[in-house]
Image (cartoon, grey):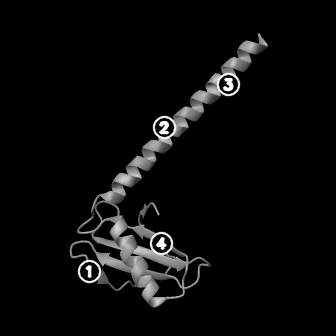
Amino acid sequence: MRRNHAKLFWLGLIGLLLALLIARMRHVATVMDEQARPYGRLTAEEIRERALALYHTIVPRADAVRIAVDRPASGSPLPCWTAECTDAQGAFPIDFQWEAATGLCAPSDAPAGRPRMRRAAV
């Protein structure tokens, strides 16, 4: 009787782990699809590359840079991409914005570290 309970426990655990793995794989696929899809003229990867180049121009000695790329939630009146950049120690935070329709970099008036609307996986 104990063996049956142990088998059921392990089968249930394996089933749960498989379900979690499938859910995670679907989430990753959704995020990758979202990053590849343009918002306006640019994709998340293009914004990440532009932000990195600008950040290294402003802070040339930064070796490891963290970049969080965001775009507005659907229905937002502000069609722009934003990128929050810091070095590995969290110093020198800089925010960049790109107008989605034109792809041009625009000044950012939001303070660095301010919560954004929606994150693209970084």
Say whether residue 17 is visible.
Answer: yes
Q: In which image quadrant can residue 17 be found?
A: top right
Which amino acid type is marked by label 2? Ile
How far apart are the two marked residues, 4 and 2, measured between alpha carbons?
28 Å
Q: Is residue 58 above or below residue 104?
A: below
Which amino acid type is marked by label 1? Leu
How far apart are the two marked residues, 1 and 3, measured between alpha carbons?
55 Å
How far apart are the two marked residues, 2 and 1, measured between alpha carbons?
39 Å
How far apart are the two marked residues, 3 and 4, measured between alpha carbons?
41 Å
Question: Which is more N-terminal, label 2 or label 3?
Answer: 3
Kindly identify the residue that appears in the image at 21 percent across and 72 percent down.
101
x, y percent for residue 106: 31, 83
Pointers 1 and 3 in contact (CB under 8 A)? Answer: no
Q: Mark 2 sits on what residue?
A: 22
Q: Mark 1 sits on what residue?
A: 104
> Mark 4: few, some, or many residues within 10 Å (few <14, many ≥20)?
many
x, y percent for residue 20: 54, 38
x, y percent for residue 5: 72, 17
Q: Mark 4 sits on what residue?
A: 67
> Mark 2: few, some, or many residues within 10 Å (few <14, many ≥20)?
few
Pointers 2 and 1 in contact (CB under 8 A)? Answer: no
Location of the N terminus by quadrant is top right
Q: Nearer the viewer, residue 76 or 62?
A: 62
Q: Mark 3 sits on what residue?
A: 10
Which amino acid type is marked by label 3? Trp
| Mark identifier at residue 89 | none
Q: Indicate the secondary structure of the residue bearing disc 4.
A: strand
